Amino acid sequence: MKYGFVIDNRKCIGCHACTVACKSEHDVPVGVNRTWVKQTEKGEYPNTRRIFSVLRCNHCTDAPCVTICPTQALFTRDDGIVDFDNQRCIGCKSCMQACPYDALYIDPETNTAAKCNYCAHRVDIGLEPACVNVCPEHAIISGDMDDPDSEIAQLISMEQVTVRKPEKGTIPNVFYIDGDMASLNPEVTERNEQYIWSQQAAGVGHFAKYAEDRLGTSDLVQMLEELNAKDRMPMSPALDKEMGTTKPTSQHSADRQVKTVEVLMGTAKAKRVYDSPDQGILWGWEVSGYVWTKAISAGAILVPFIAELFGWAVLDTTTMYISGIVSLVFLMATGVLLVMDLDQPMRFAYVLLRPQWDSWLVRGAYAITVFGGMVALMLAAVFFGWNDVVYIAFWGSAISAVIVAIYTAFLFAQAKGRDFWQSPAMAPHMMVHSLMAGAAVFVLAGLITDTSAQWLTYLETILMVTVVGNILIMTVELTVTHPTNDAIRVVKMITDGRYRNSFWFGAMLLGNVIPLLLLALTDNLLISSAGAVLILIGIYISEKIWVEAPQRIQLT
């Protein structure tokens, strides 16, 4: 048995009955949807049409949301339905990053992930999903696709059907008859936040508030400003005067009218006229910060370990103490930031107590736990003079530090909704950042401790080598041929879009080029320390860009 949906676009009239029925059946809050009807206009006058596409969870055979979920809150039933248990959800939003179809959201009332679950409670007692039951045109067909006598199986076999983003390899089980790429492919049309009902000023999804909060803060002037925006059609003089609004210039008004006529006549390119609101940046500064603190924590162990391993510097007790203390302090900061990013922070222990081992979030959590234990053991062994234990703990700390440094690259790779994160250079990128951060911290520590010339030379060499490596890796990440348009758009956004100043002046110039010149031209500790500070700032800026930019690509 394998349940699926067929959406017959030949019949859909865009009435939104499915959306309303779904909201009623599951008490879905305002601002988020389990199913919704995207509307797109295309064509040239007089041959124009409006396309209605019912969008929802695709109940994928190989569901990336299930794979990445750290607590088994998302799971695939024996009948193929991808269901969820909000009692296990920690609100990490990994599933939302993994879904290529933007089908999940954070429920603002429970602070847990939710989505279409095929009305599993209805299916279990022999009823159809609510959206199927209410559709007036029988445009939504559900059933067992493995049953050759079922209507859905016959439609799939006889009609030419389309799925969304087949290149993702998720094997989606929602099929469209007469599916139009102008609507199903998000690249064809840009999200327009000015169409009616899309303005959720108080936030949606992860940022949603209760409906009564929004209603309590609303006023008529703000509503009119949001609906009309900067390029609104001119109101009547009387209404303008009453509302205290400013009438646009005659040229602005004329331009707006021309634009409106083009849309109405179908001479403009395909555009979406209704869609579910954007959910915003899901992983914000907390995730960028945790990647940064994690790099420092791992690097504080790896930098002295490499020196000891290859005999490039002699480690004294002070260096070992600095290594362990800095590592533990920033590891604790990493844990705090990870918990802060959860929408259910009180459930953070579920990652360890209810693990789903395919998730790299779980593997990383255990790696962090082992790493912290090894570093603590190393510090205790140094304090009590247990030389044999120091050796074992140092090796254990270094091995687990490598995993801690790079595991986030594999977690990002599981986020199939973000193409740029699939880069194979992500792991070397994070490893180099760890070595850069660790060496930078030791250079700064030299300002308050006695630092030998040999140790300082080693640290400066590590910094220069890793900075050059970092520049090369970022160059590769941004210049190699990317397999998808989404990844190419992210590169464009970084190098020539909204992040260009942060990247070129912050990450590259301030965080790499200037420190490299400072380190190469002098061996003065103060100047080297200035370079170390710039390197740490540059690492954070680049991590913020790498985390945030891919999330700005629309998935639906």
Image (tube, grey):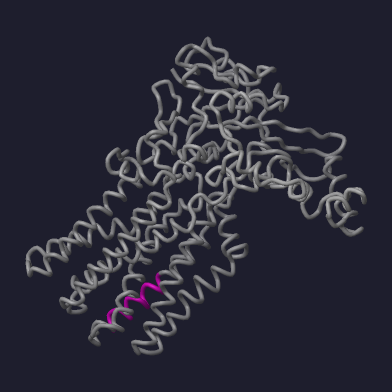
Q: Quadrant of the C terminus?
A: top right
In this orientation, which residue lies closer to the viewer: 335 or 167? 335
Q: What is the quadrant of residue 444 in the picture?
A: bottom left
Q: Looking at the image, is 455 positioned above or below residue 284?
A: below
Q: Is residue 459 left or right of residue 275?
A: left
Identify which residue, 482 or 50, lies in the foreground.
Answer: 50
Q: Position of residue 463 (x, y in %)?
A: 35, 76
Q: Quadrant of residue 64?
A: top left
Q: Is residue 194 magenta?
A: no
In the rendered view, would you say 230 is above or below 205?
below
Residue 447, percent across and down?
A: 31, 84
Q: Residue at x 47, y 19 (%)?
A: 121
Residues drawn in magenta: 457-469
Total marks in image: 0
**Image height check: is 246 above or below 418?**
below
Quarter of the rendering occupied by the N terminus: top left
Residue extending furthest front?
A: 216
Q: Which picture quadrant has residue 162? A: top right
Tell me where residue 95 appears, x and y as whole percent. 45, 41
Residue most extreme to the top: 149
Q: Position of residue 218 (x, y in %)?
A: 69, 45
Predominant secondary structure in magenta? helix
Q: Is residue 456 left or right of residue 539?
A: left
Query: Which residue is found at the position 32% from the left and 64% from the top?
Result: 330
- Tell which of 460 and 337 is nearer to you: 337
Q: Is residue 463 magenta?
A: yes
Question: Who's the residue at 55% across and 71% down the image?
Answer: 504
